[in-house]
C-alpha cells in the first residue's frame, strides 16, 4: 500500500495472444490494489511502440509529441488505453508518472524463435528471405540500456500530478541493416537482393488495406499479416526528442 516507487513491467507482449487484458485491466487492478497512492509516489510504466503503428504520417519517425490514432493491433490498443488511464489517475491521485515506450529490445534472453532468433538463423543459412531489401524501419535498444534508463528515471521523478513520456530508442534500422550487421559479425560477405521500389510500394499499399479486414479474418492470420507489414513500412520507426534532455549523460549501445 502507498508505495514510493512502482515499476510496472508486467505485460503480455506476444501480439499473437488473444487475451491482452493484463495490459489494461491488470494495470487498473494494480493501481487499485496499492491505494492510497500519495504525492510522493513515482509510477514507472513500460508501454510499447506498438501503440504508434497508426498515425497521420506513417513515413516520419514517431516521437514523444506525435499524435496517434487507434492502433492496428490489440496489444497496442490495450497499451495506449493504459497510458491514457494512468495519465488520468496521475492527475486525480497526484502521483508522478513516467511512461516508457519500449521498442524492439535485443540482447541476452530474447524470446525463443522470435525476431532475432530468426534473423540469426537467416544469416547463418544465408537465406534469400534474410537478404531482401526490406524498407521498413524499426526502433532498437539493447536490454541493458533499457534497464539503465529505468533505474535512472527512478532517481528523479516528474512533478507530482504530472506525467512524462519517453521513447528510449538508440537507433532505427531496417531488417536488412540488422542482417547485414550479423553477416559482418559472422565475417561473411553480404549480398542483398534488391527488389524494385514499386514492389515495396504495392506491399505497403496492401498493408494499409488489410487492416480493415481484422474483424473478418482469424486473429492468428491477421497477426502474422500485421507482423509482415512492419517489414515494408515505418510503423515501428521511432526516435526520441526528449531522452537526451531528460538523461543527458546517457549513451546507448549500437546494434
Image: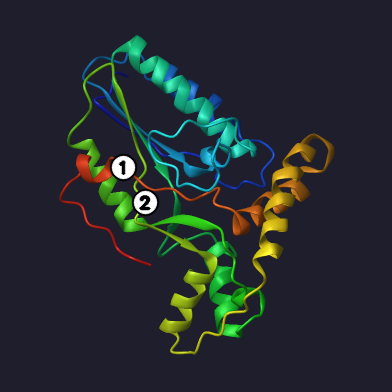
Residue 158 location, quadrant: top left
Q: Residue furthest right?
A: 216
Q: Residue at x 61, y 75 (%)?
A: 130
Quick one: label 2, few (<14), some, or many (20+) residues within 10 Å? Answer: many
Assign the C terminus to one quadrant of the image.
bottom left
**N-terminal label among 2 and 1:** 2
Residue 241, label in figure: 1
Residue 169, label in figure: 2
Q: Taking 208 as reference, is 180 left or right?
A: left
Secondary structure at badge 1 equals loop
Taking 195 as reference, is 160 above or below it?
above
Q: Residue at x 70, y 45 (%)?
A: 208
Q: CA distance from mark 2 to mark 1?
A: 10 Å
- On the image, the x and y values in percent for residue 13 come to 55, 45
Secondary structure at badge 2 equals loop
- On the image, the x and y values in percent for residue 165 come to 35, 33
Q: Residue at x 61, y 84 (%)?
A: 125
Residue 185 location, quadrant: bottom left
Amino acid at each position: 500500500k502507498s508505495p514510493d516507487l512502482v515499476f510496472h513491467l508486467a505485460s503480455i507482449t506476444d501480439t499473437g495472444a488473444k487475451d491482452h487484458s493484463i495490459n489494461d485491466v491488470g494495470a487498473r487492478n494494480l493501481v487499485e490494489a496499492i491505494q492510497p497512492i500519495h504525492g510522493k509516489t513515482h509510477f514507472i510504466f513500460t508501454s510499447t511502440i506498438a501503440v504508434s503503428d497508426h498515425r497521420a504520417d506513417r513515413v516520419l519517425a514517431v516521437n514523444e509529441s506525435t499524435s496517434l490514432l487507434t492502433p492496428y493491433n490489440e496489444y497496442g490498443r490495450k497499451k495506449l488505453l493504459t497510458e491514457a488511464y494512468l495519465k488520468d489517475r496521475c492527475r486525480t491521485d497526484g502521483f508522478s508518472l513516467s511512461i516508457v515506450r519500449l521498442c524492439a529490445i535485443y540482447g541476452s534472453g530474447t524470446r525463443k524463435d522470435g525476431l532475432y532468433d530468426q534473423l540469426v538463423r537467416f544469416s547463418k543459412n544465408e537465406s534469400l528471405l534474410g537478404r531482401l531489401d526490406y524498407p521498413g524501419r524499426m526502433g532498437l535498444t539493447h536490454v541493458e540500456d533499457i534497464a539503465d534508463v529505468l533505474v535512472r528515471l527512478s532517481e528523479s521523478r516528474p512533478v507530482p500530478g504530472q506525467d512524462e513520456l519517453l521513447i528510449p530508442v538508440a537507433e532505427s534500422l531496417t531488417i536488412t541493416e540488422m542482417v547485414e550487421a550479423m553477416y559482418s559479425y559472422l565475417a561473411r560477405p553480404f549480398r542483398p537482393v534488391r527488389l524494385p521500389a514499386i514492389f515495396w510500394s504495392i506491399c505497403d499499399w496492401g498493408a494499409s488495406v488489410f487492416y480493415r479486414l481484422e474483424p473478418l479474418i482469424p486473429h492468428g492470420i491477421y497477426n502474422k499479416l500485421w507482423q509482415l507489414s512492419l517489414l515494408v513500412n515505418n510503423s515501428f520507426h521511432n526516435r526520441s526528442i526528449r531522452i537526451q534532455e531528460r538523461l543527458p549523460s546517457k549513451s546507448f549501445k549500437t546494434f
